[in-house]
Image (cartoon, rainbow, N blue to C red):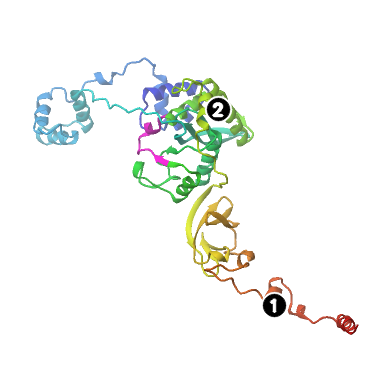
Amino acid sequence: MATLREEHVRLAREMVARAVSVRQVAADLGVDESTVRYRLARPADAPDGRRERASILDGWTERVTAVVARFGDGPPAATVVHEVLVREFGFRGSYQAVRRWLRRQAGPRPVQAVRRIETPPGVQAQHDWFTIEVRLAGVPTRVYGLIGTLSHSRARFVWVSTTMSQLAWQAGHLALFQRYGGVPLWVRIDNLKTAVATGGGPTAVLTPAFTTFARACGFGVDVCRVRTPQDKGKTERSVGVTRTSEADLWTTDWPTLPALQAALDARAQERAAQRSCPITGTSVAVAHAAEAVLLQPLPTVHEPFDCVVARRVSRDALVSFEGRRYSVPFAWVGHTVEVRGTADAVVVLAGGAEVARHPRRTMRRLVLEPTHYEGPGTPTVRAPVPLGHRARLQLAGLPATAVVARPLDAYVALVQEACR
């Protein structure tokens, strides 16, 4: 955002009034610090005199009108008019001066009407990241908040993290679903790298990890159009409101991040009881309670992962992942399984269930679990040849002398027992 609109200036004044630094306000609004200082120093009711300034094109009306009249199909681009004026009339002004003059002559543009819709309860939630600086144990720390709003009841929650990784993206969604009391049918998001691999908007191609995550949780992903924040206006507005209304929480020195999270959860409950839902006319807390029963059940077991791939199991019951090979039960030889990389584990899923789990990013390049090679065969895969006595000794780290015959006294005992 290169300039500040009036609503942004009002938001900046509120943030500064709540002891937020001008530098932080500029960073949050995405503009230069000098821009914020200039707009804050200017009186709120001061008129904008730029429209009344003289233009270098004053007195050129006939010539510019004649140039524009050459293009009967519609008004030409300002660049075309500028080139003609320079070439034929020796105009020395800038392209921007021509552009402003043409806009002033054309008058205000038609207002684009916006369709307002409200989704039924339990259908949609809107999620988005925002960044803010807090103090944790006395240290200024950049924190990322994943804010979620149920579109129908307007129930709003914030989950905070120190990263915006794929693991944090999924963990944040799960945390918001728990606070909702269920999973909505759709989640509307922005064009984030953790969610969108290529494209944007309705034609966006999701990342494999987020695609698998959404499928496992049972919600559809609705990606907003590129550079169209009003597509998720409820959450966009919630970001601004949360920055200002919870300013006392952001400026407090917290011992740990969970302490800040607990305070945010408590504040969310307080706000829900105070705010009104425009659709039901009740408080947001009452509307949320009614909407929660219409949400899908929470995922029973789920672990956030930042990488998911499909791999074919080799004859020696191994799959390749991140430059290493991991064993799986031999019954899946020849089948394609799903391999997920979680925070600290490599999880292999097949047949809708977890079949193997190994430590992730270990120094070893070959990670084996001996029990994966035991058990009966299947109609399509014969069991590996059983280990012989010598092989078991070697795996146990025992020497060959361990195969010595029984001691003499043991044989004497056997003979005496047989002669009775």
Give the quadrant of the N terminus: top left
> Circle 2: is it few (<14), some (14-19), or many (20+) Cα within 10 Å?
many
List the residue tagged with mark 1. 390
* Residue name at image x 71 percent, y 74 percent: 393
Q: Amino acid at mark 2?
A: Ala
Task: Tell me the quarter of the picture where residue 406 sits.
Answer: bottom right
User: Quick check: 173 above or below 268?
Assistant: below
> Circle 1: is it few (<14), some (14-19), or many (20+) Cα within 10 Å?
some
User: Residue 14 at what x, y percent from top left?
Assistant: 47, 21
User: Residue 352 at what x, y percent from top left?
Assistant: 52, 54
Using the numbered discs, state the Cα–Cα distance from disc 1 to disc 2 in whole angstroms.
66 Å
Q: Are marks 1 and 2 in contact (CB under 8 Å)?
A: no
* Residue name at image x 50 percent, y 30 percent: 291
232 inside magenta stretch = yes
SS state under label 1: helix
Which is more toward the observer, 130 or 65? 130
User: Residue 59 at what x, y percent from top left?
Assistant: 13, 22
List the residue tagged with mark 2. 268
Q: Amino acid at mark 1?
A: Arg
Q: Is residue 121 left or right of residue 110?
A: right
Q: Is residue 325 left or right of residue 84?
A: right
* Residue name at image x 44 percent, y 38 percent: 187
Q: Is residue 205 left or right of residue 416?
A: left
Q: Earlier in the sequence, mark 1 or mark 2?
A: 2
**Residue 142 visible in the picture:** no
Give, as a single range, the part of the protein colored magenta: 221-233
Q: Is residue 202 left or right of residue 410?
A: left
